[in-house]
Image (cartoon, helix red, strand yellow):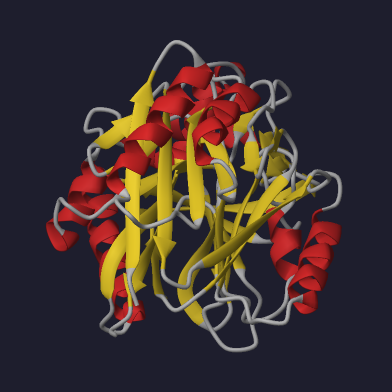
Amino acid sequence: MTLVAAVGQAQALDAREAGLQASHKALNQMGSTSPSLAIIVSSHRFEAQMALNGAASLLSNIPILGFSSPAALTNLGTHANSVVVALLGGDEIQAETHWFADYSQGSADTATRLKQLIGYEQRPVKSVLVFGDGLNGNAEEFCESLLPNLPILGGLSAGDVQNNIGYQFAGTQSGNGGMATALLRGDYKIGIGYGHGWTPIGNHFRVTRSRGFWLRTLDGRPASESYAELFGHTPRQWSFPPLNYTSRLYPLGFEQPDTVEMLVRSPLRVEADGSFRMNAPLRDGSDAYLLVGSPKSCVESVKQAVEQALLGLEGAKPVFALILADVSWQMLLQSRPGDEIRAVQEILGKDLPIAGGYTLGQIIPARHADENPQFLNQHFVIALFGETAE
C-alpha cells in the first residue's frame, strides 16, 4: 500500500497568502497522489479564518484539520508567524473531519458525540485526530468520557494566553473554544511515542485549595508565594509578565498508582491573586513535586519517544511525522530553537516530512488495555505514519 506525505511552509504578512503559499508548496510535492487529509498549523497571530480560506482555496474538497500555535515545526526547524500545511494521501486512505463548537462549554458532551459518531460508521476507524481549545476546555474530562482503547491522538491549541485565545480548524470552519476532529481509515500503520525532560528536584507541596482550573494555595498559602520563596522575586512579580508565563517551566508532578511515572500538570499563568491557572483540575490534599527541565534531558526524551514510535510501526516504513510539543519546550529551548527536530532527525534522517507545533497539552491513546486515553502536560509527542508492505 502506498502512503505519500508532503509539507509546505510559508511566511507572509497576509494570513490568506501564507495559507495559500503553504498549500501550493505541499501540493507540488504530492505528485500524482491525491491528498486524503490536510493538517494546518497556523500562527496564532494570524486571523484564523483567513489562513484557512487561503489553504482551502487550493485544497478543494480535501478534509482539513488544524490548530494555532506560537510556532510551527517542520523538518527545517521552528517557524514563527507562519502557516504549515501537511498533506497525507494513499491508495486507500480516507478521512472525514468534524467540528464541535461547544467543546469548551461541555467537554464530556463532546466526547459523547464523538463516540456516537464513531459508532454510526460501518467501517472501523483506524485513527482519531483531535485538536481542541487549550485554554478553556477540560481535556482530562474529555479523555475520561471517551471509549477505552480508542486510537486517538491530539493536542490543545496554543495562542494568546493572556486573552484566552487559540484557534482550531475543521473543514471550512475555524473558531475559538471548539474541537476539530478527523476520523482516518485505511491500510497504514501508526506508531506513537512520547516523553518529557522534567524531573523532580526534591521540593514538595500539598495542594490545600483548588477550585476548577485554579490552584489557589500550596501548603496553605498562595501558590505564587511558594514559587517566590524558591526562585526569588516577590509574589506580586510572579503575578505579572514575564514571570507569570514563565511559571510553565516549573510544572508540578503527582504520583500515580502502578507506575513510577508522574502525572505532570503545568500552569498556564499566575493570576493577579497569586493563584495558578491550570487547564486540568487538581485534587485537594494531593502531594505535588516541583519539576525542572533541562535541554539535555529533553533532547534525550525526544530520542526515546522516536524509538517508541518506531516500535509501534512494527517494521512499517515511516512516511510522515506529526509532532506535538508542549509550549514549555519552546520556552526552554529558546536559545537552541529546533533542537527537538534535530534529535528526531538523528534517528529518522533529514528527508522525512515533519509537521507539527507547540501545544498546551497532548492527548495520547491508553497505555494499557481497557484504559481511557490520557491527557498530558509538558510532553513531546511524535506520531509516525508508516507505509505497510505490499
Q: Which residue occupies 71% across, 41% down?
A: 217
Q: Tell which residue pokes out farthest to the bottom in this image.
A: 369
Name which quarter of the figure residue 102 lies in: top right
In the figure, is residue 137 to the left or right of 202? right
Residue 389 lies, with reference to residue 239, above or below; the image says below
Q: Quadrant of the C terminus?
A: bottom left
Q: Is residue 258 visible?
A: yes
Residue at horizontal 22 percent and vertical 55 percent from the top? 352
In this orientation, does residue 380 appear? Answer: no
Using the image, determine if residue 210 lies above or below residue 224: below
In the image, taking residue 34 as reference, residue 298 lies left or right, namely left
| Towards the viewer: 99 or 291 | 99
Q: Quick check: 260 above or below 296? A: below
Quarter in which the N terminus is drawn: bottom left
Q: Work out whether residue 122 or residue 190 is closer to the camera in this orientation and state it.
A: 122
- Estimate the x, y position of residue 23 in percent, counting from the top left: 42, 35
Tell me where residue 388 appears, x and y as whole percent. 32, 80
The residue at 83%/64% (across/down) is 113
Q: Position of residue 43 (x, y in %)?
A: 49, 27
